[in-house]
Image (cartoon, rainbow, N blue to C red):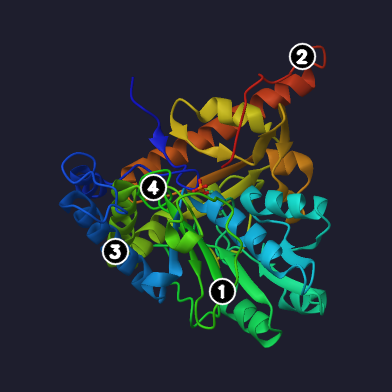
Amino acid sequence: MQRPIFLDGHGTTPTDSRVVKAMMPYLQEQFGNPSSQSHLYGWEAEAAVKLSRETLAEAIGAQPEEIIFTSGASEANNLALKGVAEAYFQRGKHIITVKTEHRAVLEPCRYLESLGFEVTYLPIQSDGLLQLKDLEDALRPDTILVSVMAANNEIGVLQPLAAIGRICHDHKVLFHTDAAQAIGKIPLDVKAMNIDLMSLTAHKLYGPKGIGALYIRRRPPLNLAPQIHGGGQEHGLRSGTMPTHQIVGFSTAVELALTELNREAGRQKRLRNRLWSSLKQLDGIILNGHETERLPGSLNVSVEGVDGAALLLGLRSDIAVSSGSACASGRTEPSHVLLALGRERDLASASLRFCIGRFNTEHEIDRCASTVCQTIEALRQSHQSFKDKPNLDKTSGNTTLSIN
Ligand SMILES: *Cc1c(COP(=O)(O)O)cnc(C)c1O
């Protein structure tokens, strides 16, 4: 059986074979611990980590010593949020974030609330963008941190980072951004954008899972309380043996993405627009999020008159996409991002998140478009006949849907 077309790149991406090739030597021959100072194995691993750190720093306009490797963006977000809260609580206990953040930001915020911090969750406009006025109004003398994601993982919307950075800078409040979906897809410059902390991950841009980084501004220095204590690696900010192969994979993935950024962005945008043009031929298809301020490969739509679970069920043998629901404690809940946009619960559940990536072809997009259109039409027709025969039970299957 043919495998479904993969269009779920906001969840994760395959590791590029060029990345795998760059990683291999560090799993077998050059397997040393980068912290081993006394022999060749340690030295060569250390040199590889150093080079990767330089590559990553350069990619975001930072200095190498401002990059701390973590297990991914979740850990980087936790280190940023809890690390700042713990280091600055005497200055203030107020944090500002946005309702549409990833759970790896929202949950640390909830945790900090349980410790006595106050968190403001800013609303968004119907296009998914934050209103700068809302941010300015929310700032208080005791605000210590603002955390706003660069690109949303469900609707792909890009927040105005530079403008947010300027406001935070002017108010002397730290600015953290979760750039897990943005790195390698849009240009990022921590200095120009006044970013103090930035979370990154490799597996959304064709690198391996389990490696990420936190950019931490050093000039002027910023205090951060470590969350993992141990051997004192990464200036004591993140203990644990450094996974050389993962780090090399991460920097190789970033390097490739930046080299190909312009070409790929143009190609993905063209395919995304092609998919959108086909889908919007149907009635009752609603675009979620800003039409242009979004990642090039991103498309999120709500579908009127169909059940979300039935829609995914109808698609899953042909295309791998996710819906606007997340499985929270066993119950399927509509996405908090789509609800924040103002979508009704039914429309939020009946949505599809597409991410067109490096390995998708025009042929695949055309196949996807026709499969989606046919499935929607078929579901609407059967729904109509159910309506005609009210005795039939139309409960949908117990599928577990999830969004990462
Ligand atoms: C995927 C993702 C994360 C989590 O990253 P991990 O590296 O899997 O921990 C956090 N934030 C956003 C916006 C993401 O898309």
Q: Visible in this render: residue 318?
A: yes
Q: Nearer the viewer, mark 3 or mark 2?
A: 3
Say which residue label 4 marks: 241
Badge count: 4
> Reading the chain from its start, which is encountered first: label 4 or label 2?
4
Q: Which kind of residue does numbered mark 4 sit on? A: Thr
> Reading the chain from its start, which is encountered first: label 4 or label 3?
3
Taking 6 as reference, is 377 left or right?
A: right
Disc 1 crowd, CA 10 A, few/some/many (<14, 14-19, 20+): many
Looking at the picture, tell me which residue is in the foreground, 274 or 350.
Answer: 350
> Reading the chain from its start, which is encountered first: label 2 or label 1?
1
Looking at the picture, tell me which residue is in the foreground, 220 or 177.
Answer: 220
Say which residue label 2 marks: 393
- Looking at the picture, how far across and down is residue 130, in whole percent? 69, 69
> Reading the chain from its start, which is encountered first: label 3 or label 2?
3
Say which residue label 1 marks: 196
Q: Which kind of residue does numbered mark 1 sit on? A: Asp
Q: Nearer the viewer, mark 4 or mark 3?
A: 4
CA separation in Å, label 1 and label 3: 22 Å
Q: Nearer the viewer, mark 4 or mark 2?
A: 4
Name the quarter where the C terminus is drawn.
top right
Report the disc number at residue 394: none
Say which residue label 3 marks: 50
Query: Which residue is at 40% across, 71% downward?
Result: 65
Disc 3 crowd, CA 10 A, few/some/many (<14, 14-19, 20+): some
**Which SS class for mark 2?**
loop
